[in-house]
Amino acid sequence: MERLQRWFGTRPFGGFQPRLFLYLFCIGAIPVLSALAFLYMRDAERSEREWRANVAYKHELAQRRIDGEIRELDFQYRLWLQDESVRSLVRAAREDRLAQQEALRAAEGHIVDKAAFFAQYRKYTQDVCIAVEEAGPFCVKSSPFEYESVPTRVPINRSDIYVRDEGGGRIAWIGPLFDPNSYVVVGYVKLVMNMAHLLDDIRDEAGLSDLAVWDIASGSVVLESGSRRIGSSGGPAAMDSGADAHVRREGDYFLSRRRLDAPGQNWVSYLEMPAAEAMSRRASLRHTVVAFLAILLVVSAAGSLLFSTLFSRPLHVLRRLMKRAESGDLKAYWTPGSIREIDELGASYNQMLNRLEETIKQVKQEESLKKEAEIEALHYQLNPHFLYNTLNTIKWVAKIHKTPQIADAVTALVRLLQASLGKKGDFLTLKEEVELIRNYMAIQSFRYGDRVRLNLEIDPVASICLMPKMMLQPLVENALIHGLVDSAGDGEITIRAWLDRDMLLCEVQDNGKGMADPEAALGTKPAAKGAMERMSGIGLRHIREKIKLYYGPDYKMHVFSKPNEGTVVRLSLPIHRSEES
């Protein structure tokens, strides 16, 4: 019972309308079953004796038809004996060889023409074969060897006529062929009949289940028409063989046996016919079931459709509106005008859409304000850090040179401050960013002299791409101050930029002292105390956050470094170009 409930809860019975249709149909099936039981009891009052007589009558008609066709073969045999073409064939077989061949061909041609004429009126006669001892067998339509799986026995006298099974659903009527002058048997005439075709026609016309020809002597089926394969069962062998005609009933079938008039054979015709009582009951039940089920289906479908129109259709409309809302259409409002309960549900749905739209607007506004505040905070965090280092450089230049180089350093500083604090926007081309780095390195040259060299490897196509301003300068600053500050030899900073598919890749590489733990510089791990005091990695962490705020998590910054092997910082950015480029 529990499994049945689970089945009703799944498709195709998960919907309201299919379930309603199924309930109506099951309720209506109760009177249908009651009516069928009543009709079954009334139909069982038929008398079995009447059906036995009906079976015997049908078998008698079938028996007459079979015997008539066999007698027709005897009639055809008599006609061929009197035919002049056959007599010419017999005479030609006794002449000399040269004349024999011409006469045989002429006689066979006449026989073929006449057989073709007879075939128009004899439906079941399949072939005519004539054999003369001196000339051999000859068949009108087929090769005589097709029928010689078992050699044909030549009749020994003029009355030696017999019927035999030729296989393939055929029987043959074989009679002696004798010289009309001496009456000496010189061969035979064989008429081949398609008995299987005859049995099929009789069975279809009489409405029989199975019809067969049974050989009593061998206890086997000679020919059979039907689907029950009576040869595998006892068949007529289990019936009383003493009576010429016998009818009995086994289960839902009537069995009947009658002797056949087949010369030289002890054959009987065997018939099986479904018990008409059972057939009548099944037919009546089938027609009644079809009628009642058709009415019940129409009534159930009409009832479920009517109720669905009044109740289910508004629910389907509301469901479609909800689907639109799921896809992002927050204007898919329910319009009142249906059943009161559904209108109340639709009003709650409309109120939910209004609240959801207000919530989305509020979230978007808060996210926008938050992003602007974070970007602005990064600018104000980066600029003081940069300004601190720049002023520190100017201090060292003033101590060492004390003269006009301060003006050059201040000029470069002003350019950097203009780029950092100017109103040009948040994005610069890579070419402009590199120019800012040149200004920065011009300032730093007053402190380090020729000990630090800047190398540029910029793809011309990449140089016109846009990127957030002051993105590469903090990386150069970190490489200079924290990577090369204590280096014994000359320092070298290399900036590379190129395009790879749909990404702009930028690298800042130095040959300084490197780092044992690059993750600490990015802020993903706690840094050592000394490093925090030197403000190491502040620019790297903020650059990473800046990329995330502008472009999302798909674009990142990677740091590759080992002690005494330098550091490489790589940025992966989307390709953006200005309208002028």
Image: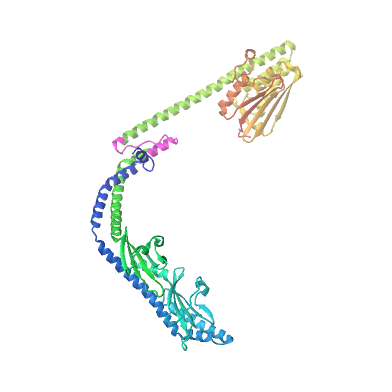
Residue 269 horizontal/vertical position (percent) = 37, 68
Figure colour scheme? rainbow
- Residue 541: name its quadrant: top right
Vertical position of residue 169 compared to residue 440: above or below: below
327 within the magenta span: yes
Instruction: Work out which quarter of the rendered image holds the N terminus and state it.
Output: top left
Q: Nearer the viewer, residue 189 or 176?
A: 176
Is residue 268 toward the left or the right of residue 457 in the image?
left
Q: Is residue 411 visible?
A: no
Instruction: Work out which quarter of the rendered image holds the C terminus and state it.
Output: top right
Which residue lies at the image location 43% right of the left edge and 78% below the top edge?
A: 161
Is residue 26 toward the left or the right of residue 576 in the image?
left
Which residue lies at the image location 39% right of the left edge and 30% below the top edge?
A: 354
Which residue lies at the image location 56% right of the left edge and 23% below the top edge?
A: 375
Q: Nearer the viewer, residue 289 or 49?
A: 49
Q: Is residue 389 visible?
A: yes
- Residue 173: name its quadrant: bottom left
Is residue 164 toward the left or the right of residue 481 in the image?
left
Residue 529 horizontal/vertical position (percent) = 62, 12
Q: Nearer the viewer, residue 387 or 206?
A: 206
336 within the magenta span: yes
How many marks overall?
0
Q: Nearer the viewer, residue 101 or 123?
A: 101
Residue 178 horizontal/vertical position (percent) = 47, 84
- Extreme residue in the top direction: 399
- Extreme residue in the bottom direction: 181
Vertical position of residue 7 compared to residue 104: above or below: above
Residue 295 horizontal/vertical position (percent) = 28, 52
Q: Which residues are magenta?
A: 319-341
